[in-house]
Amino acid sequence: MGSVGVLALQGDVREHLATLSALGVEAGCVRTPAELDAVDALILPGGESTAIAHLLVTSGLRDPLGARLGEGMAVLGTCAGLILLAREVLDGRADQWGYGALDVTVRRNGYGRQIASFEAPLALVDGSSVPGVFIRAPRILECGPRVEVLATYAHAEGVDPVLVRQGPVWGASFHPELTADTTVHRLFVESL
Amino acid sequence: MSDTQTTRTGSTLVKRGLADMLRGGVIMDVVNPEQAKVAEDAGAVAVMALERVPADIRRDGGVARMSDPQMIQEIQAAVTVPVMAKARIGHFAEAQVLEALGVDYVDESEVLTPADEENHIDKWAFTVPFVCGATNLGEALRRIGEGACLIRSKGEAGTGDVVEAVRHLRSITAMIRRCQSADANELYAVAKDLRAPLPLVLEVAETGHLPVPLFCAGGISTPADASLVRQLGAEAVFVGSGIFKSEDPVRMAHAIVEASTHFDDPAAVAKVSTGLGSAMRGWETSSLDQRLAERGW
């Protein structure tokens, strides 16, 4: 396994670093193209996707990160990070851009505003359960044929995919970094 | 088996969690949808919807209240980032209205005229999370004890003078360090002196930080101001009058966002500070008749 970085332009960077640290993985912050060059895998944290997208441009990281994704770098995006990776984003800004590295359609704030933010147990494909924390979360509406669904959230109207993977690119609509459960990060790190 | 029974809204984790998502960013005061768009375009992580920025409240005088719901709704419709709005200290009915409007954070704010000179709002009773101002650690922990999920150092709103923001931030972080170095016997007296809940004092002594994120507000008006307060321990920055009272609000908004992200890179702060036009004119805090930061108890 190579080195893991956390994109540290804005958002809950510290929680990702702490979760990785709990797994014995020492990760560094990525805020410049040189720091991106130095890592083999990257986590896109939770935060505000419009702010992170803006800062990716102004920090000169937008194209280098796109190139690394094209080369097959392993990336895990949580919440805002998932939005940046998704092929299609509904209810975003008119000029919303993304990497299109995950063949999923997501709706921004798809579960509602902050007063609808929630916690719920999630079902992993192996039958176990992990805690889910959803904060103004994107909702995954559709997944392409090459997308694996690794965890779901069952609710009154149906079952939503919440953790998905397409090769080296992982996306979670929730925040595994906000709880003490390290399962999602462990699965990602073990895949490297 | 349905998991809907175990779905919980309004938990402490999701309320504090939204504040975690704002870390590193800039929250900007806006008075109309056009300003809200400018803020979002510049990379603001959230906007604070209000009828008058603090500099104008200070200039106009009169009773400052919660904003007109129509104005808040227009701003909610204009942007995709979280929208915050202010309620008067102790005015839980204003907070109820803001929650009914679906605002993402309520600021129980000293910038508005207080409605209760003894009690703050019981913030645990709400699903919407609250941010509150504080000038020192005791005040911060009392607000957290009442359910605040985010603390901002108060500074002196509407002045463009960063001196009070620095004073309050330094006061909070210095007292946290004192808690960390106090022994177990001393912490009871520390809690008494701070007039703060003992369990929260013990938590601060253990962890070395507040139980909720600590942001900074009140008087930040340049990129270097943002860098300063971030280096002093603020995890994000509220900018009130400093954007739209400056000569070139669009550039100032972009520059302060960059400076908050790259706060520890002086070359980056220098770059965005260059040719920026004048910051808001401001008032020197020592010349003021009324200090907003003294509101709150």
Image (cartoon, coloured by chain):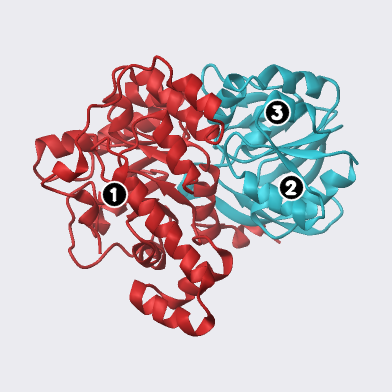
Chain colours: A cyan, B red
**Disc number for residue A152:** 2
**Taking B28 as reference, is B6 above or below it?**
below
- The quadrant of the picture occupied by the N terminus of chain A is top right
**Taking B277 as reference, is B122 above or below it?**
below
> Would residue A115 be seen by someone viewing this image from the given angle?
yes
Question: Which mark is in front, 2 or 3?
Answer: 3
Q: CA distance from mark 1 to mark 2?
A: 35 Å
- The quadrant of the picture occupied by the C terminus of chain A is top right
> Would residue B99 be seen by someone viewing this image from the given angle?
no
Q: Give the image location of residue B1, x and y in percent.
A: 71, 61
**Disc number for residue B97:** 1
Give the residue pinned by disc 3: A85
Q: Answer whether labels 3 and 1 touch (C-beta < 8 Å).
A: no
- Mark 2 vs mark 3: which is more N-terminal? 3
Q: Give the image location of residue B55, x and y in percent.
A: 20, 35
User: Numbered disc 2: what chain?
Assistant: A
Q: Amino acid at mark 1?
A: Val
**Taking B289 as reference, is B180 above or below it?**
below
Q: Give the image location of residue A67, x and y in percent.
A: 78, 18
Question: Which mark is in front, 3 or 1?
Answer: 3
Q: CA distance from mark 3 to mark 1?
A: 36 Å
